[in-house]
Amino acid sequence: MEPLSGIKVVELAIAVQGPAAGLYLRDMGADVIKVEPPVGDASRYGRNKNNTLPEGTLGAQFVAVNRGKRSVCLDLTTDEGMRAMNALLADADVFFTNYREPALVKLGLDYDSLHTAYPDLVYGSVNGFGPEGEDADKAMLDGAAIARGGLVSMTGSPDSKPNVPGAIVGDTGGAMHLALGITTALLARERGAGGQRVQTSALGTQLWLQQWELTHVSMTEHELSRGGSHHPNIQGPYGVYETSDGGAILIATSMDLDAWDALCLFADVPDLAIDPRLQMPGQRLGEGLLDLDSEQIRTRLAEGFKTKTALEWDAFLRSQPEIIWERVRTYNEVLEDPQSIQNNYFTDVEVPGVGLKKTVGNLVTLSETPGSPKGNPPLLGEGNAELLAAAGLSADEIAALTDRATSVREGLFGQAAEMRAALQVQIEEQFR
């Protein structure tokens, strides 16, 4: 028995911030029904960089956050589509969405409407900037949330413009908070609270991820600045250093003086081993150091790290268990990391037309009722017949709904193809 076995979840969400929450619930045993519009979740077709896979191949973003779910394709702008949606919700435990509030109200899928109809339903919603205020319904992509939440301002070198982090931490962070809120509300329901609304946002999650840094600025009333290869709120050795062959090592430092001495000798910077600014454990974590101290110490360490290759540093540091360190790895190296593989942090999914590919799996383990990865990403509408029949719709009704979605999809794709062809003609004429 998995922790969420028997829990039925209806997901009306696109991209990452909603669907990644549904992925967590699915891995923990819930039955997650993904309701998609006639054209499907837009991320189904995303190609992004360096993608030479055949046209029509599922997008990596869709594959990553939708494995194991079942897809129902409905046109919710029609009465028939909404009747089917309500049939799915009739015995659901959870409904969640990242659609904007005006659209939900127009569809009759806002919290007040569904709570009246289904008082025990846990209703989850996540947006960009929170449920209140003038920007509650403002459109959001990951970069907007991390810009407003301060993370972009802290990313990059001190002498450069702010940078965007290398992962969509606004979207995925919002999804984590949504999943946490939904499971909390399910526990409250078990204790008699009934259904309720769960709300969070990408902006709120950014603040949660930066609690220490924001509190530090609040308490000291002094702004932090970008640290580049070093954390903006940590002085001293902590940071990323380049090796002689262009590799990189992150050193957090060592509480043990003997290990610190060994590092300094291996790096051929013996002066740091006897530096009075680095003799106490707290000093090696930056306590009491001034900006100039840090700059001098980091410069010497940077010189020392460039005396050895990344593999030489790796071998030495593995012999020093008291030193906190890690080699900076590329994504390809991460995918082959034996530590992650040993912990079952990856799972394989079958991608139509591509074959078996690796993606991130279930990352939370429970000793008595563990969850597990749940298979492949769904084809658009593949669950229409089974799930809508189970919800009480007739075969004729299901066929009509499916035909309607197919007709809308083919019409929209046809229009898009015509627009692309017309644009190509304009480009060719322009350069004749």
Image: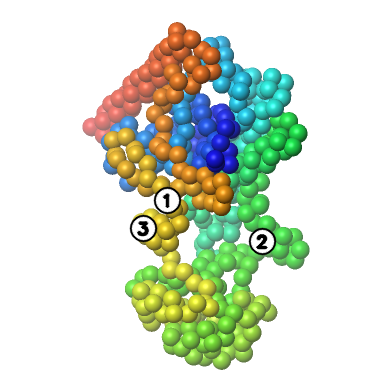
Quadrant location of the C terminus? top left
* Amino acid type indicated by mark 2: Glu
The reply to whether dot 2 and dot 3 touch (C-beta < 8 Å) is no
Query: How many residues crowd around disc 3 within 10 Å: few (fewer than 14), some, or many (20 or more)?
Result: few
Measured as percent of width and height from the top left, residue 142 is found at 54, 44
Specify the color scheme: rainbow
Residue 135 visible in the shown view: no
Extreme residue in the top direction? 396
CA separation, marks 3 and 1? 10 Å
Q: Earlier in the sequence, mark 2 or mark 3?
A: 2
At 62% across and 31% down in the image, what residue appears? 94
Measured as percent of width and height from the top left, residue 381 is found at 43, 23
What kind of element bears circle 2? helix
CA separation, marks 2 and 1? 31 Å
Residue 11 visible in the shown view: yes
Reading the image, the residue beneath label 1 is 346
* Amino acid type indicated by mark 3: Glu
At 38% across and 70% down in the image, what residue appears? 247
* Amino acid type indicated by mark 1: Phe
Q: Earlier in the sequence, mark 2 or mark 1?
A: 2
CA separation, marks 2 and 3? 33 Å
Measured as percent of width and height from the top left, residue 194 is found at 73, 30
Reading the image, the residue beneath label 3 is 336
Quadrant of residue 11 within the rendered picture:
top right
Reading the image, the residue beneath label 2 is 213
Measured as percent of width and height from the top left, residue 319 is found at 44, 80
Residue 117 image label: none
The answer to whether residue 254 is above or below residue 79 is below
Quadrant location of the N terminus? top right
What kind of element bears circle 3? loop
